[in-house]
Image (cartoon, grey):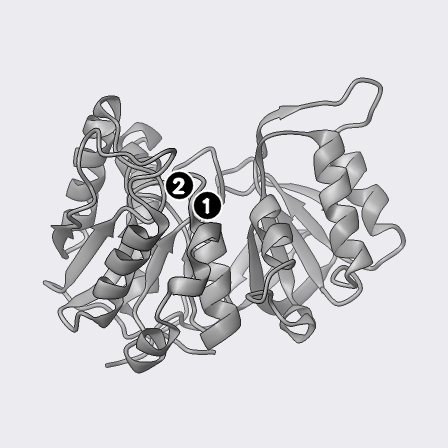
Amino acid sequence: MLRPGALRPGDTVAVAALSGGLDADEEPLFRRGVAELGGLGFDVKISPLVEIGRHWWWGAATPTELANEFNRLLRDPETRAIFALTGGRMTLSYLDLIDYAAVEADPKPVVGFSDIDAVLLALHSRTGLVGVHGDLVTYGYGEWQEAGAERRQELADVSSRLLTSTSPVGLLPSGHDWDSWRGGHVVGPLIGGLLNRLVRLQATPFALSPERFDGAILFWEEVNTSTSMIWNDLHLLRHAGILDRIAGMVVGPVADIEVTEGGPGLREIVLDVLGDRDVPVLANLEIGHNPPNLLLPLGVRAQLDADAATLSLLESAVVER
């Protein structure tokens, strides 16, 4: 693992368009998200590609422009973390343009989910970087206010400790709807993200090696698809031998999913594909397209207790710098 340097109060962090752009109706979310990052004690700088109405096809800019801006931030010694503006459909197009040597030379936290997971997983595959599957600036940090004062404080506490402290976060605060689909207790490194991005990444030169899944807790979520597509994608992971390697599974609250006519629900699908594998499954965690989200750092050892419906981070995600 390549742990990034811990953030300090006053550090400069960047909000970057790594995939989609900023629409006019998203500006209030964007402003609130930037304010939340500032409230964590960071000096927030906005990438030049974050401009209302700026678009190329379905992204904020061309793949080359997105990669160039990302690389600039990776190489900039004053930028200590990179937070993704939003998700989208662009990241798979520029994985071959990322400066992985810059990541190794100066590892820093990269935070986001959805389409950003392709970048996080590629960085982890190529360099071992502990990327952070967590809130986007718009859909995530921009929605903290709507979570209520108590939950907002819990999210701020987890975000601050995970990004700034070399001590393990420990028990993650439950949203109270976590559901055990199969009992058991395991410890292993966290690996995962948006299911369809993980599956697609495994068909590229940036795929995670099979060993990355040994004893791992696989976490995933999905959006805008059907139960039959999820069933097929999980079978792809089974065919690849991944489900034979993992120790546990965490499933996010799958958003905007069509239950295929005549088919079972998501719980039945997951258990059907797992078969008789002894893999505990904890579901409905806040790790996807129903933000705000908890932060899950790739590669960090966690403890999954599906009987007690808890998930704990046993290692730090960052190191002193």
Where is residue 109? Give x, y as percent. 32, 64
Residue depicted at x 33% and y 49%: 18
- The residue lying at 56 percent from left, 35 percent from top is 177
Q: Could you tell me residue 74's position as x and y percent?
A: 26, 67
Q: Quadrant of residue 185?
A: bottom right
Check disc 2 and report the residue beneath it.
87
Q: Which residue is mark 1?
A: 115
Q: Nearer the viewer, residue 244 or 94?
A: 94
**Position above or below: 133 against 292:** below
Instruction: Kindly identify the amino acid type of the residue bearing the numbered disc 2.
Output: Gly
How many C-alpha atoms fall within 10 Å of the one at disc 1: few (<14), some, or many (≥20)? many
The C terminus sits in image quarter: bottom left
Query: Could you say where residue 180 lies in the image, as x and y percent from the top left?
Result: 69, 44
Q: Secondary structure at mark 1?
A: loop
Q: Residues within 10 Å of mark 2 (few under 14, many from 20)?
A: many
Q: Which mark is residue 228?
A: none
SS for dot 2: loop
Q: Is residue 245 above or below residue 144?
A: below
Q: Position of residue 86 (x, y in %)?
A: 34, 40
